[in-house]
């Protein structure tokens, strides 16, 4: 079972959060190939990533983030549960299907997602729907970033085609709280993740070791 967090294997939640401080410092102090991406601009975030809220709080406190646009993240609506409003960060909750319209309406300046696994060539696997955001960002000319600890990189998987994708139970789509909505006998395909090709990651991959172009990840992380 692959949980929809970035690289909880082999890291524990506690260890993952210990990466927050160097990751945040890295974001502003060590970006060798990319300028800071929040200037204060609007950002579209694919949520349900453990350290994202802390990262956003730091960005907001520095005046580099004006608004977070949060997709609801079906079928479990993890995005609807973000607590950024408690920190005074302006948030707008949207449906997953409204991402394209939202980018046009709000003038989004950056898309930031996580990664459960990163292949050797820089392809990334993340919560299903990430590929749709990558395609939208590419079409609209919006920088697309992946933020993940270096432990997400798997040099033994040459590309995204080698990343196994979990398929979830059909009842997650056919029922809500035990109440059936879809007709009996309907076919269901419910992947938990999708794969974003490395060439669509136009902003870079942010790790605690640096911000890298996807194609240089293998060289930079080998031996780390």
Image (cartoon, rainbow, N blue to C red):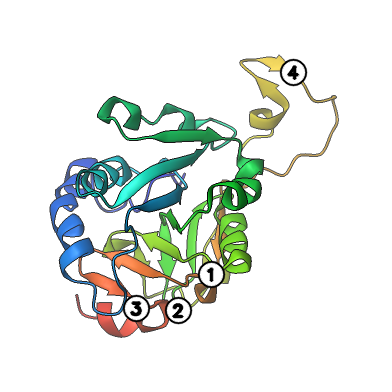
- Disc 2 from disc 3: Cα separation: 7 Å
* Contact (Cβ within 8 Å) of mark 4 with mark 3: no
Q: Secondary structure at mark 2?
A: loop
* Residue located 41% across and 40% down the image: 48
Whichever of labels 2 and 1 marks the residue nearer the N terminus, that label is 2
Judge the density around disc 1: few (<14), some (14-19), many (≥20) Cα neighbours within 10 Å.
many
Residue 93, horizontal then vertical, whole percent: 51, 33
* Contact (Cβ within 8 Å) of mark 4 with mark 1: no
Q: Nearer the viewer, residue 72 or 127?
A: 72
| Quarter placement of the C terminus | bottom left
- Disc 4 from disc 3: Cα separation: 45 Å
* Contact (Cβ within 8 Å) of mark 2 with mark 4: no
- Disc 4 from disc 1: Cα separation: 34 Å
217 w.r.t. 90: above or below: below
- Identify the residue under disc 4: 180
- Identify the residue under disc 2: 121
Of badges 4 and 3, nearer the viewer stands 3
Count of marks overlaid on the render? 4
* Contact (Cβ within 8 Å) of mark 2 with mark 3: yes
Residue 221, horizontal then vertical, whole percent: 26, 77
Whichever of labels 4 and 3 marks the residue nearer the N terminus, that label is 4
Residue 159, horizontal then vertical, whole percent: 51, 75
Judge the density around disc 4: few (<14), some (14-19), many (≥20) Cα neighbours within 10 Å.
few
- The numbered mark at residue 217 is 3
Judge the density around disc 2: few (<14), some (14-19), many (≥20) Cα neighbours within 10 Å.
many
Q: Nearer the viewer, residue 90 or 221?
A: 90
Q: Is residue 150 left or right of residue 92?
A: left
* Residue located 23% across and 62% down the image: 27
- The numbered mark at residue 160 is 1
- Disc 1 from disc 3: Cα separation: 14 Å
């Amino acid at each position: 079972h692959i949980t929809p967090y970035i690289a909880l294997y082999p890291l524990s939640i506690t260890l993952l959060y210990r990466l927050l401080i160097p990751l945040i410092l890295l974001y502003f102090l060590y970006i060798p190939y990319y300028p800071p991406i929040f200037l204060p601009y609007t950002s579209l975030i694919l949520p349900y990533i453990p350290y994202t809220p802390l990262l956003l709080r730091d960005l907001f406190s520095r005046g580099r983030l004006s608004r977070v646009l949060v997709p609801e993240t079906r079928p479990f609506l993890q995005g609807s549960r973000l607590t950024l409003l408690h920190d005074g960060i302006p948030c707008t909750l949207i449906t997953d299907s409204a991402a394209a319209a939202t980018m046009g309406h709000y003038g989004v300046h950056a898309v930031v997602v996580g990664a459960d696994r990163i292949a050797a060539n820089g392809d990334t696997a993340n919560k299903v729907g990430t590929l749709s955001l990558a395609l939208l960002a590419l079409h609209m000319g919006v920088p697309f970033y992946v933020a993940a600890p270096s432990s997400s990189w798997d040099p033994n998987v040459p590309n995204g085609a080698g990343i196994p994708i979990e398929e979830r139970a059909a009842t997650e789509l056919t029922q809500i709280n035990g109440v059936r909505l879809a007709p009996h006998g309907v076919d269901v395909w419910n992947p938990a993740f999708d794969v974003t090709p490395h060439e669509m990651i136009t902003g870079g991959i942010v790790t605690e070791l640096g911000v890298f172009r996807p194609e240089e990840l293998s060289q930079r992380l080998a031996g780390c």
